[in-house]
Structures are given as structure tokens and as C-alpha cells.
Amino acid sequence: MPSALPFRLPRVIGHRGASGSAPENTLAAVRLAAEMGARWVEVDVMVSRDGHPVIHHDDFLERCTDGSGPLLAHDLEALSRLDAGAWFGERYAGERLPTLEALIALLKELGLGLNLELKPVAGWEGPTARAVAKVLAACWPPRQPLLVSSFSERALSTFAARLPGAPRGYLTTVVPPDWRERLAASGCRTLHCEAGPLLRRESVAALKAAGIGVLCYTVNDPDQAETLLDWGATGVFSDHPERLLPLLGP
């Protein structure tokens, strides 16, 4: 199995920042998560048509911006003019899609750890992973904790070829029966799975016994979070870190 992580994972990670209280995947959501006491955030990264990594979850722009169509159909210059906050509330009008460089600068200022999820459009796994690895190699603070995850095994392998020393996480909906083989093949040190009815205590315990960190998404109920941690989960992703942190701590 892959070696242990060089840092301690938190019990609560702000999901897309504090996305229950601010527009997801924006600098405002990251700042708010820090104000709430989170020490880590999780965000999603894609690439623009001209190859720049930007922080955004969906393939299309409509849900979280005033733009339209596929994000991949737009250059960074056009994406930088979009409003990524007004959809959530008037107070966030004018919030922009962050570049990966802008996100890193804020995380450095706040001292936050990052789980960066690679979200490549189908067919763009390689270009996405290479573009992200290039920016991280140039900008990431060397002593700040970083975990890169993805549902795409191809994106993970491409990223690993560029930045082999960066810890990686294997994203899945349900813990697969062959998780040992998958983690060994991908070199991933954590497994991130849905905190749904298909997750079993026995699976979490087996992963923990193997030295694999287990992070569960998306958990907004303190009782559910406590149950998962009792099972042996390392931590949870939450849209509302302010609900969990008073009980679970950072």
C-alpha cells in the first residue's frame, strides 16, 4: 500500500469552501470557511479553453455563474468577467471565478490546507492534470499540506507523472471491492467516498486498518459525522463546517 501522509488530515474540511453559506468554489467561500474555524478546504479545478486552471465544479457555467455553455469553450479572459456570486445572493454579486494561482495565494495568506479535486471534462484528463501540476509546481507553498484527488484514474496517473511527491486521493461513490488493488495501482493514500446508505462500517474499518485515510462527503449533520468518525473515518467534507467544528474540532 502507499506510504502514510506527511501531514495530519482534519476531521472537518470545508466542501467547496463554506458552500452552504457562500457561493461554492469562490474565494469568498474559502475565506468564510477559515473564519468559521476550518483548517482545510476542498475545491474543484478545471481548465479553460486556453489551458488555465480555474476553480469550478460543473462542466457547464449556468448553475454557478451568469455565463452559459461549457466552461471549456471559453478562454480565461472571458471567464474572468463572469459573476460567480450573484446567483447565491446579492451580497456576493461580483465574485469571480478564481484561477488556481489566486486560490493558492489566498490559502497561503490564510494558512489553510487544500484538497484539490481534478474535475476534467471527458477527454481532457491529461491536459487538465498537466496544467494543474504545472501551476502547483510553480506556486504551492512547500510546507503547506496539499492532497490532490479525482474520480479519474487517468487524471491521477498523469498528475503523478508530473508531481510524484504530491499525495493523492482516490475518489469514488461507493468503496469498490477491489480497493486495495486500485489504491496500490494509483498510489493514492486516501479514499474519498459518499457518506450514503451503501457505506459500511466494515469497509471503513478495513481501510483504516490498512493505513488508508477515509474522507466522506458530503456531511452536514453532526450526528452523522460523529457516527462516521466512530467507524474510523478520518474526516468529512461539509458545506456547513460551522455546524460540525464546535463539536468535532478542526
Image (spheres, helix red, strand yellow):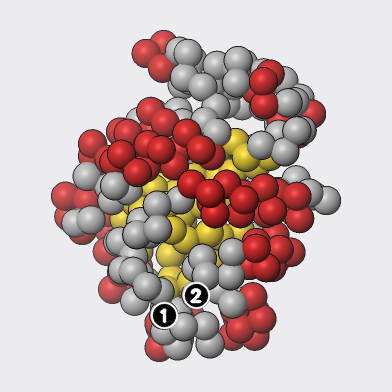
Q: In this view of the protein, which residue sits in the foreground, 67 or 132?
A: 132
**Amino acid tagged 1:** Ala
Looking at the rendered structure, the number of numbered marks drawn on it comes to 2
Q: Earlier in the sequence, mark 2 or mark 1?
A: 1
Crowding near the residue tagged with mark 1, few <14, some 14–19, many ≥20 C-alpha atoms within 10 Å: some
The residue that label 2 is drawn on is: 189
Identify the secondary structure beneath mark 1.
loop
* Residue in the foreground of this view, choosing between 76 and 154: 76
> Who is closer to the viewer here, 72 or 234?
72
Q: Residue furthest left?
A: 246
Determine whether label 2 and label 1 are within 8 Å by CB.
yes
Compared to 227, does 30 lie above or below? Answer: above
Residue shown at 47%/13% (left/top)? 94
Residue at which label 1 appears: 4
Residue at image location 34% in from the left, 76% down from the top: 232
Distance of label 2 from label 1 (alpha carbons): 7 Å
